[in-house]
Image (cartoon, helix red, strand yellow):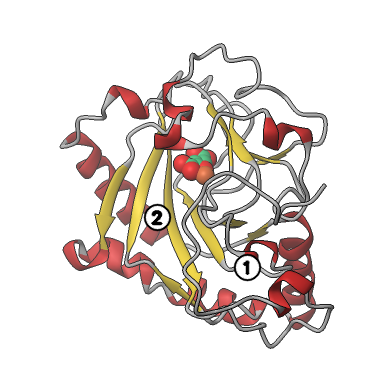
Amino acid sequence: MTPETALKTRENMLRDGYCVIDHILTDEFIGELREESERLIADHDPPEDFKYQGQHINVRGEDNAIIQKLLDWAPSRRALEQLGFGDFKTSGGIIILTKEPKGPPLYWHQDWMQWNDPISCSPWPQIVFLNDYLTDTAVENGCLKVIPGTHLKRVPLHDQLVPAHEQGARFVEEDHPIMFSDHPDQVHVPVAARALILGDARVLHSAGRNYTDERRTLILAWHRRATTDVPDYWDGDIPEAIAQRDPNRNYPGSRLPGEHLKP
Ligand SMILES: O=C(O)CCC(=O)C(=O)O
Ligand SMILES: [Fe+2]
């Protein structure tokens, strides 16, 4: 990545809540990941509750050499460093998420679970997902959908959603009029198989239905900064809530955006 591309990509990430980095995996390694994910899927019995996320298999790197190889993958690490995100650390594991052939869409949600903490309004990312898709994605097979900027700005949809995953969204009906809606500001994020999508845990995202007969597999790896310090690259204003934040306080977890997400 040239320094100009790195700067532009980071600007996209900060402004939109996601960015795409091309040419991260090699064809050979994608082949290995496909084979390994298919092997794990064959041994897995997906619970009905998880149908909107597909297979949903958690794998720890320490239990699986191929997954550890992905977590250590030098091009991903180098890309993070070039973006200024070198202080993000892996959680040590990944989740295999799929859209099965003709599988249903994934509901709108955001994955931030610390909305009581003033760090929620950081203009820089603190927790991100690294999404490696093992096939090309398109509207046809349920590519990622994002509403850019919603990691920092409240929109009416925030207050209409059933909270993500185990907190309700897994149990909604397939024809839920809001959870699977089209949004005027949504963008589709189709990618070629070797690309990486970086997403801010706070951004509203979803995925379309898979209209094809092929499984669409995603390996999602959570990464977080070990610190809440202002990152070196940040030279903008520091929000008052962050400047005043008490790092020693214990902020109870919450998936519901509260006062720290302003319209
Ligand atoms: O399936 C996807 O494209 C995204 C998955 C996701 O965002 C999630 O499971 O939280
Ligand atoms: Fe998500």
Q: Amino acid at mark 1?
A: Ile
* Residue occupied by mark 2: 30
Q: Is residue 88 visible?
A: yes
| Front position in the image: 11 or 237 | 237
Residue 234 image-quadrant placement: bottom right
- Any atom of ligand 2 within 8 Å of the CB at mark 1? no
| Front position in the image: 241 or 158 | 241
**x and y percent of residue 198 in the render?**
59, 59
Asked if residue 66 is positioned above or below residue 244 in the image, the reply reads above
Asked if residue 7 is positioned above or below residue 256 in the image, the reply reads below
**x and y percent of residue 253 in the render?**
47, 55
**x and y percent of residue 174 in the render?**
50, 14
| Front position in the image: 56 or 219 | 56
Residue at position x 78%, y 68% in the image: 11
Res 156 label: none
| Front position in the image: 44 or 49 | 49
Instruction: Label 1, secondary structure: give it.
Output: helix
Res 119 label: 1
Residue 12 image-quadrant placement: bottom right
Crowd tier of the residue under label 2, counting other residues whose Cα lies within 10 Å: few below 14, some 14–19, many 20 or above: some
